[in-house]
Each structure stands twice: as C-alpha cells, then as structure tokens.
Image: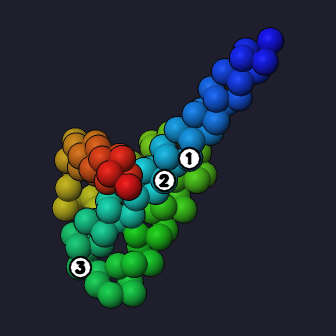
Amino acid sequence: MSSLKDREAAFEAKFAHDSEMLFRAEARCNRALGQWAAGLLELDGEAAEAYATSLVKADLSEPGHEDVIGKLVADISGRADEADIRARHARALAEAKAALADT
C-alpha cells in the first residue's frame, strides 16, 4: 500500500511541476509577444516593457491564449494580421518551453 501512495504522490508532484512550467512558459511567451508588438507599435524603453507586462496580465483574465491573441489583433491592427500573430505565438511558446527545459 505504501508504494501506491508513493506513486500517487509522485504523480501529483509531476502534475504540479508540469503545471507550473506551463504557466511560466506562457508568461515568457506573452512577454516575448509583447516586446515584438511593442516594436511594431514603435514603443521603446519603459513603454515597451509596460506593454509587454500588460500582455502578460491580459492572459490572466481568461483561460487559454485567445485573450492575448484578441488584444494583439486589436492593438496592432494593420501592422500584422491574425495569422501572423498566431504563428508568432506558436513560435514564442515553443521557444519559451525549450528555454525552460534547458534550465
């Protein structure tokens, strides 16, 4: 019975770790998207950092990444289309996951 409880505890720990890593990867992804969009909006310095931070916070309003995509589509309309934003998001998320896996 002890080994069953040990396995259960290990699965719970892995789930918690995986959830935390996904959260961190999504935050990194959103920050990278925010910095990219800030460049398109010709923001720099503190304004660019504030925009990137606002994008990270926007992701906390709803589950999933559609809230971030929607904000970007509205904010950078005419500078990038939705397909470009989604492709950039997919690339940024993959890069963020890879960076976290290396740590």
Which of the labelled discs sits on residue 42, or is there none?
Answer: 3
**Which label number is shown at residue 20?**
1
Q: State left or right for residue 88 relative to residue 56.
A: left
Q: Are marks 3 and 2 in contact (CB under 8 Å)?
A: no
Is 60 left or right of 31, judged from the image as shown? right
Give whichever of discs 1 and 3 has the lower sequence position. 1
Disc number lying in front (3 or 2): 2
Q: Mark 3 Cα within 10 Å, few/some/many (few <14, many 20+)?
A: few
Q: Helix, strand, or loop for circle 2? A: helix
Separation (CA) of disc 1 from disc 2: 6 Å
Q: From mark 3 to mark 2, how far is it between C-alphas?
A: 27 Å
Q: Which residue is mark 2?
A: 24
**8 or 87: which is nearer to us?**
8
Q: Residue furthest bottom?
A: 45
Q: Position of residue 13 (x, y in %)?
A: 64, 36
**Quadrant location of the N terminus in the rendered image:** top right
Check disc 3 and give the amino acid type: Glu
Identity of the amino acid at label 1?
Glu
Please state which of residues 68 and 56 is positioned toward the viewer in this rendering.
Answer: 56
Residue at screen point 29% across, 84% down: 44
Label 1–label 2 contact, CB within 8 A: yes
| Residue sitting at the far top | 1
